[in-house]
Structures are given as structure tokens and as C-alpha cells.
Amino acid sequence: MTSKLRGTGQHGHAPPVAPDAGRRAFLGAAALGVALTTGARPASATTAAPATAADETFMRAAIAEARRADFPFGAVIVAEGEIRARGLNLGKQQRDPTAHGEMVAIRRFLAEHGPEALRGTTLYTSGEPCAMCMGAIVWCGISRVVFAASLQQLATKIDQIMITCTEVADRSPFRPIAITGGVLAEEALALFPPGDRPSK
């Protein structure tokens, strides 16, 4: 919409709006109403970033963290080609249901480097970030997420909130983020023991 909101005239009446501008305003409002009533999403805030040769190297580091975790989830945060923080699920050890691998990595990074340094980093995680972790990733300004096993794959192994990280990012258009999935997914899934599904 190109018309600008202007103040009222001397007698408290708004100045006349040009027909074209009024029509544009009406069409814009109608489009917004359709989006709200149909559940249409805003333009995507994500970009599909292809995997790079380095992605497998850093993902293996995240999977190594997952092997030591209470639940098999691990993460690393990378800046300028170097791992700056590592995290693993510590939910049982810390008696903290929010201590997911991504959250632990973010907290450790913040403690050592501060929040400003998170901008432009890449977070690698053995499992697609849950809604909580993805929200934290967005608020921290992390520029890229690379995950191994997808939410749908993880849901066959352990309980999950079925909101994908892409859905969270798409509803956060103020902070675009690149997402790459499926890197070494089978290696990450192999960490889950067969049989009964563990419950977080």
C-alpha cells in the first residue's frame, strides 16, 4: 500500500483518499482477511540451503554429542569454520526438561562468547529442532540450521511436538534463516535403541 496515513483537517475530517489508493487499501484488507480465514502463511522466512562438504563433518560432531546424551540428541554451534560450543541432551542429569541438545549448546555459547557472537553462526543438530529449540534459535539470530533426522522420522522413535522447524521459521519473517535437513539422518536414527519408545 503506497498511500500514507495523514492527519485530519482543521475540522477533524480526514482528507479525501484517491479512488485508486482506496481501492488498493480495500484489496489489501481483503487479501489479509482471506489469509487469516484460510490459514494461509506469510511469505517464507526460510531458504533451502544445500548441504556442503563441511556439513557432514560438523554433523558427525553433533552425533558424537548425542551418543553421550540422556536422550540421543546432540548439537554443535559453528562460526567461521570452527566449533564454538557443544551441547547434548541433559534432561535427566539436570532434571530440566528444557535441556535439549540445542538449548545446552546455545547456553554454553552465550556463557563464553555473548549473544552478539551468535549472529551468523550455524547450528548443527542430530534431530530437527523442536518448537521450543527453534524459537530460541530464531531469537538468538542464528543464521543457519542443519539437522540430521527429521521430525517425522523422530516421531517414530520418541514423542514429539509435531511442529516443524520450518513452520516456526516461516512464522518469524523478521529473522530469515537457512535450513538444511537430512544430513546423516540414518546415523542419527541408529542411536535410538529398538523396542519401547522412551518418553522425555
Image (tube, grey):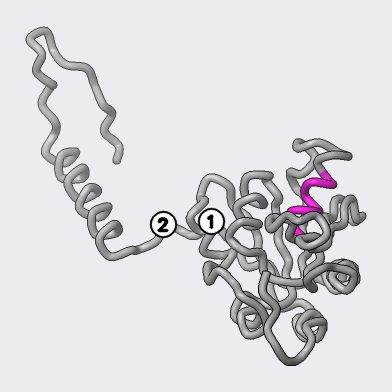
Residue drawn at (83%, 45%) of the image: 109
Question: From the viewer's perspective, is 191 left or right of 163?
Answer: right
For label 1, the residue is 45
Location of the N terminus by quadrant is: top left
Q: Secondary structure at mark 2?
A: loop
On the image, the x and y values in percent for residue 147 come to 72, 70
Q: Secondary structure at mark 1?
A: loop
Classify residue 7 by image quadrant.
top left
How far apart are labels 1 and 2 at the CA level? 8 Å
Question: From the viewer's perspective, is 130 left or right of 61?
Answer: left
Q: Nearer the viewer, residue 114 or 81?
A: 114
Residue 174, placed above or below residue 47? above
Q: Are marks 1 and 2 in contact (CB under 8 Å)?
A: yes
Q: Give, as a three-letter code, the residue at label 1.
A: Ala
Q: Residues within 10 Å of mark 2 (few under 14, many from 20)?
A: few
Residue drawn at (80%, 41%) of the image: 110
Classify residue 116 by image quadrant.
top right
Residue drawn at (80%, 60%) of the image: 90
Q: Which mark is residue 42?
A: 2
The residue segment tinted magenta is 101-109
Dominant secondary-structure state across the stretch colored magenta: helix
Question: From the viewer's perspective, is 58 left or right of 89?
Answer: right
Residue drawn at (7%, 10%) of the image: 11
